[in-house]
Image (tube, grey):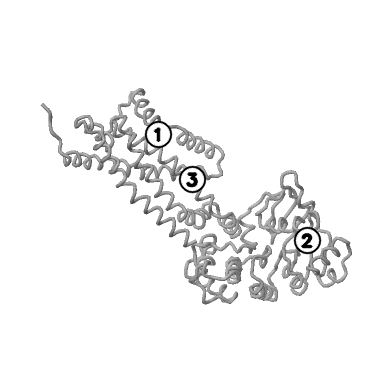
Amino acid sequence: MLVQFTTWDIVRNLLDAAKWTLALSLIAFVLGGLVGLAILFARISKHRALQAATKAYIEVFQGTPLLMQLFIVFFGLSLAGIDVSPWLAAAAGLTLFTSAYLAEIWRGCVDAVPKGQWEASATLALSYTQQMRHVILPQALRIAIAPTVGFSVQVVKGTAVTSIIGFTELTKTGSMLANATFEPFVVFGLVAAGYFALCYPLSLYAKRLERKFHVAR
Amino acid sequence: MSLVKIAGLHKHFGANHVLKGIDLDVARGDVVALIGRSGSGKSTLLRTINGLESIDKGELVVDGTALHDGRGDLRALRQKVGMVFQQFNLFPHLTAGQNVMLAPTVVKGTPKPEACDIAKEMLLKVGLSDKFDSYPDQLSGGQQQRVAIARALAMQPKVLLCDEITSALDPELVSEVLAVVRQLATEGMTLIMVTHEMRFAREVGNKLIFMHHGRIHESGDPKTVFADPQTPELANFVGAVQAA
């Protein structure tokens, strides 16, 4: 016997799933930010081997599809005898992906600080660490805010891919509902609306920040 | 006993030999003007004196702190050599006062209140005691450059390097910056400046160095050197500058 789904049932289930999309996005963004910061410092350090290693790390994650990265984390770890839940694999995969992109975005921001700032602070006898902490990073941070918020949109949308390894977030729930209700157009329309509701405020906010910091400079 | 001693200094940019054996002695209280055409090596020479440009070969000694063939304690050297740039290079995220306080607190470990007093004193010296809390983008070019001078002075350098410090300024702002430099010279500050202000060089400087193709081509007292150039290159340069 068939269970009848009302539109409200669909919406209620999707809202419930959206919480997981949001949670995964937040975790990936926060952890990815922390890992990304570590990679940034290695990337801009004067240590040649560290530079090369982090450059390779960034290129690998930027040059392969997120889906492949998730497959490798999910299946690779189980192959190595470590049993990972889809939840853990999704969080780990997205964290690595986010860290690589954020490190590269932030490196661009550090590069955007004019050379004269390095020279002036060097002339005042500041050490590399002191230059970074007091002169370069505070300025890079201002430049970084808008593109960082902008990238968070990519993270939210990236979580959709984790449905394929079986993590039950918005997209996965959408597929299951579509199969059960035979109304894929309505269901996926609502799923898309859900992503839009999460992403649009973020990109609006990023645009506003961008304008604000452009005027301020 | 010279304060700055440069001997046999060579510098390459790739295949380009930009400084071809410079020997230079600067005594305490000297005001040295470096002139020459662009590409003559004058800015590069200035920038080697605090290690912004590395030295390939030769010796640089400032008040007892030495670099041999470019090796030595750069930060110790930089504590003795202040620098002011053409583009001011103030830290835009800090107020004028914080710009001046930064190096004393961070590098020398001067306590904040004391560094604040130093900053106030230095800003007073350059005539900007009322701008302590202003951010660089709220100041005119001339004011920014004076803050940059105050920032360099706060580290109590033995010698101050000035790299075309009026070149980026609107004409009406040049004099307020030159007035500060003139005052420093009268107070006995040792100054080495790359400049296009020939009149200022003649009036304030006591030593003029004309650079040509990476060498010191002619040097001496500015008044006599300007009046009676010994080489055709300098005569040519002086003529070109005065015609402009």
The nearer-to-camera label among 3 and 1 is 1
- Per the image, the residue denoted by label 1 is A66
Residue at x 34% of width, y 42% of height: A156
* Separation of residues labelled 2 and 1 (CA atoms): 58 Å
Q: Residue B214: where, in percent of width, then height? A: 79, 54
Task: Determine the secondary structure under disc 3.
Answer: helix
- Per the image, the residue denoted by label 2 is B36
Displayed quadrant of residue B216 = bottom right
Relative placement, left or right, of A37 versus B137 is: left
Look at the picture and state if A98 lies above or below A165: below
Task: Determine the secondary structure under disc 1.
Answer: helix
Image mark 2: chain? B
Q: Are marks 3 and 2 on the same chain?
A: no
Q: Residue A40: where, in percent of width, then height? A: 48, 44
Image mark 1: chain? A
Mark 1: amino acid: Leu
Mark 2: amino acid: Gly
Q: Contact (CB < 8 A) between labels 3 and 1?
A: no
Question: Along the line of sight, which residue is nearer the eye, B235 or A38?
Answer: B235
Q: Residue A106: where, in percent of width, then height? A: 47, 47
Residue at x 47% of width, y 54% of height: A143
Residue at x 58% of width, y 61% of height: B89
Displayed quadrant of residue B43 = bottom right
Image mark 3: chain? A
Q: Are marks 2 and 1 on the same chain?
A: no
- Per the image, the residue denoted by label 3 is A41
